[in-house]
Amino acid sequence: MGAASTHYDYLLTALVMVPAVASLIVAFTPSAASRLVRAIGSATAVATLGLAIVVGILFRPGVAGFQMVVDYPWVSTFGISFHLGVDGISLFLVLLTAALFPIGLIWARERENVKGYVGWMLLLEAACMGSFLSLDLFLFFVSFELTLVPMYFIIGGWGFERRGYAAIKFFLYTFLGSSLFFVGMLAVVFLEAGHTGHVSFSLVALSRNAGALGGAGTWLFLAFTAAFAVKAPVFPFHTWSPDAYEQTPTGGVIILAAVMAKLGTYGMIRWDFELFPKASVYFVPLMLTLAVIGILYGGIVACRQRDLKRLIAYSSLSHMGFIVLGLFALTAQGTTGGVIQMLNHGLYTAALFLLIGFIYQRWGTWRLTELRGLQAVAPWLAGAFTVAMMASIGLPGLNGFVGEFLILLGTFVSHRWWAVAATAGTILAALYFLWAFQQAFHHRPGGVVAQPAGAAEGPPPRRGRARDLTVGERAIMIPLLLVMAFLGVYPQPVLARITPSVDALIHHVEKGSHYVEPAVSRGRASAVGATGEGQPR
Amino acid sequence: MLLYATAAIVLLPLGGFFALLVGGRRLGNPRAGWLGTGSVALSFVATAIVFGALYARPPSHRLFVQTLFSWLPVGGLHVSVAFRADPLSLVMALFVTGVSSVIHLYSIGYMEHDEQFHKFFVYFNLFVFSMLVLVLSENFVLTFLGWEGVGACSYWLIAFWFVRDSAASAGKKAFVYNRIGDFGFVVAMFFLFNATGTLTYTGVFSAARAGHIAGTTATAACLLLFMGAVGKSAQIPLYPWLLDAMEGPTPVSALIHAATMVTAGVYLMTRISPLLALSPVSSTIVAVFGVVTAFAAAAAACAQQDIKKVLAFSTVSQLGYMFFAVGSHAYTAAIFLMVTHAFYKALLFLGAGSVIHGLHDEQDLKKMGGLARYMPITAVTFFVAWFAIAGVAPFSGFWSKGDVLTTAFPQGHIMWALGEFTVALTAYYIGREFYLCFYGEERWRRLAALATASPGHGIGIEGAGEGYEPHESRPVMTVPLIALAVASFFGGFINLPIRPDWDFLSHWLAPVVGPYSYHFPLGLSWAVGLPVMDGAVALIGVAVVTALWWRRWDRPALEPMFLQRGWHLDDLYDFLVGRPGYRAAGFAADRFDPLVIDGGVNGSAGLIRRAATRVRTVQTGYVRNYALGIAIGAVAIMAWVLSRVGV
């Protein structure tokens, strides 16, 4: 797990610093210069995407450890450093983050108080990048918590009618989880310091001495996981999410559902597995059970939502359950599937929320009782929604299937009956999505859709009489959908980068516990052991 | 080298799909249709070339695998996009592309007035692509891609006229029922991977032959895959979706819901014959489900009013025969019946489509009658299809259904008797449809007059005004009818059991299914007597229906409600699953989640509610106070930790 490369180390620093500095610049720009602010926001987001793509290109596949590592001392007394690195597990989350912020800043931008919106969004991007790249527990904690503040203000400032309620609920839930995380973090560091004799927040050092925690690891795992479970969300810590998803403006909800939810599952794989291998294995049954309950329960509740955004909130509960299931399956297929599904879920959820945003701009509602027959008036919109929905349902050939299949297969190998129960969740996904699609898109145009443009309540449609997707809107939807199709057909480049890191991680968990990965998931050939280490112990 | 054209079979319709997706609207009507038809026809040519190349090899070497790229390589899992040309997959590909070409051609005429003309062919080409992936894939996962792909296309095409609520609901129902079956397919794959470490057909089957798969695992995998097949091929208890699927345009019913997609389940069960050989109990279950479905659906077909619903139940029934054959280890007979069924059932649907088209979208048999005078080609070809499906010698159904029944006879006399009785029912229900449609009183005249008298009241035939007269369809529609009629008549000749070198299909499929098929030697008297009996039973059915329905159109005693409602299966599901499930989900969504979970996790829901009413104070003090409280708590715990550690 050592640093594999120190070349290009400025790249990761830039990924965090460029949006951070830009948000500072925005803070000192006069509010009246909203066009300038918007230009700064768009340019920064695009530049960050460019940097992330460069990172993706320079990333060397087949390497398990961290690449492009940066390590500057920060608070040396406490062993805290500005320590960044990217591996197969974080690479695609970084790319996802970099790809979705331009959407939030350009295609789903806000009209009012532009300065505030752009400033908070850029700070949020820096915090998300910091969370995914950080190799220092303190830096991770700071970044992880820092995501909370901008999102709180985005919900509260640009949200819909019940934004106040949603924002405070979001804040309290996540903050409650975070406070446990904070205590847990300090406990881990000082317990290990008591063992080694010097304080360090470094992931590598903490991970190496994971055995020193002993029985305390069990409790600390729970403290960490509480914060991650709220963020994901995992059943039963999900009830903030339907309200928050519903009330958050489009640009914010794309980030909230597609990127910030992954902070939770990423935290589990990066910090739980590394720091508490023994407790992670001990709690596998609990986590799998919560995941499966989330999958089924989220699906059932989604069936009765009358509101597209809340429906996707519950569908996300179900899909995040799949991710947790895969991660804690602790097999090559399951855990890799969980990691790639974080990317997949981010992509199709972002697409769905963006499309719902487009619907809202035109008809001022996302309630299924008011929308009727959209496909007749907006075939492009309907087509794009169909593809994103099918990806979410897990239709093979689109990206959702790749993750779901690997997760379920990998879980079956290690924990058969959880996998069988979770597979039933794929039926529910078809049920609620197709039902919702029929409500909103099929039938003759009715409800607000049948009214002349502009008659709807809410913000007036700003594109005059355009009801279907405009050229600009197609320009963002088509690449998103193409990426989904590409990842569904040819996920190999992604898998080739994820698998080495996941294998190393599972190996780490095996070393720190009594767990042995089933031979079948590693394949007969590697069970014999190419490196001599793969043999069952 | 010609075998490398295998990938082209699949890629041609895919190319057609992309071309139509991007430029279909610009190509317009009818050129988009010709592009779609052309790409499928080329795929047929490619299949024929590969077929010839494979035929040139000695029988034991008739297997060619073309790997394109690695799809899901993770750890011990290696799933590639790889195609397999072997006798079974090529028979499937040949009839799929052949029938698809004909039905594509027909659709150019049938869909001529539709506003979404090009979109129809987008879906249609995507369907053919998915179906070919399904049959040509070299592993379970890629087959599953095709399997779900055809399901999605089916959803889009059933709901093609989505402004009709019934069509939209039917599409959704088809997808969800299929998903229930697919649950079985997916879990079966997990079982097989867990047992063998691979999901390629070659790998799993060689493990099966080598005895590496335990009997219980084989049974689990077989029955779970059969669950998938039951969903896809609309068998008991998952058949209701196929009835509703008739909401789609008629060419869709002909191609997807009769000739090709619904036979995928039979293909899958034939493909896994090496696994079924390890699990006799699974074979028996398949056979029982098959023959019971064959009978039950045929009985329901006798009482339908809708021209397409008769055919839908008929398809369910014929698929039941195919599963009966699979369960009896008569794989060749199953494929033989599948191919001939594709011809005559496609013909029946296209004939029905021609009638519907000629009558301006009327589907009620009770409003038809006497159409033979106005639509002679449709009537004659429909007649050929009737005798073919009934099993009158020497039409194709006689040979193929006879093959199923003869092979099944030694393995279970009761099941055989049920199958034999269903032969008579088959001759009866299609005959009833034939007479109601083409002979007797011209009932549409009265209704056309009614529609003229009170327009816009939905009485009688919509859009039928003064001087209304049904018309024969254009050549683009009748040529496919004639082609399929010829195939329905001669189709049986691919597997004549008369001389050993005349049963081509058996020899051709022998390398794939030969070792797993049962051959009970029958004495000459049985070998001749059983087919004679099949033919006689079919003729009895024809005689009975002629006596009952010739120039008659109303016999309520012969159309009992429980058969009209398809044995009340839909009502049963609604009562058992639909309504309670809806209520339970409602409870979870409206009571349990907001009150119990939300309230419980918060510790005090009231706190949040009060907070919500005081948004303004929240901004200023509330969060800060809360954060302060937590910070104090954190410091206290920290102090405790530090005191324990002693740093």
Image: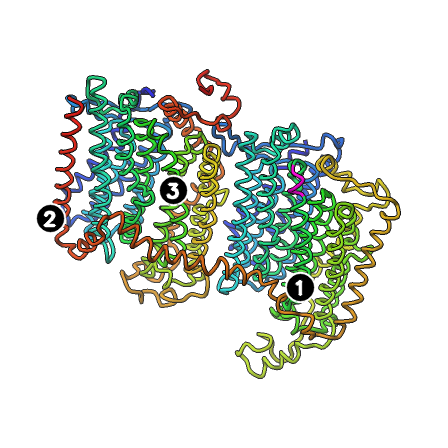
B559 to A48, vertically: above or below: below
B245 to A75, vertically: above or below: below
Looking at the image, which residue is at 13% across and 48% down? Answer: B622
- Three-letter residue code for mark 2: Gly
Give the crowd class for mark 2: few <14, some 14-19, many >=20 residues within 10 Å.
few
Which residue in the structure is indicated by mark 2? B621
Name which quarter of the figure residue A502 lies in.
top left
Element at label 3: helix
Residue A444 in view here? yes
Which residue in the structure is indicated by mark 1? B352
Looking at the image, which residue is at 60% across and 75% down? Answer: B461
State the mark number for residue A97: none
Q: Position of residue B21 (x, y in %)?
A: 51, 50
Mark nearer the viewer, 1 or 2: 2
Q: Position of residue A389 (x, y in %)?
A: 43, 49
Q: Decide if residue B530 is on the left or right side of residue A492.
A: right
Residue lying farthest to the top in this orientation: A532
Residue A64 in view here? no
Q: Quadrant of the C terminus of chain A?
A: top left
**Chain on which label 3 sits:** A
B438 to B478, vertically: above or below: below
Mark 1 vs mark 2: tell me if same chain.
yes
Label 1 close to label 3 by CB (< 8 Å): no
- Three-letter residue code for mark 3: Gly
Provide the residue span drawn in magenta. Answer: B279-283
Task: Work out whether residue A490 or residue A524 is closer to the camera in this orientation and state it.
Answer: A524
Residue lying farthest to the right in this orientation: B525
State the mark number for residue A321: 3
B276 to B543, vertically: above or below: above
- Three-letter residue code for mark 1: Ala
Q: Decide if residue B405 is on the left or right side of residue B19.
A: right
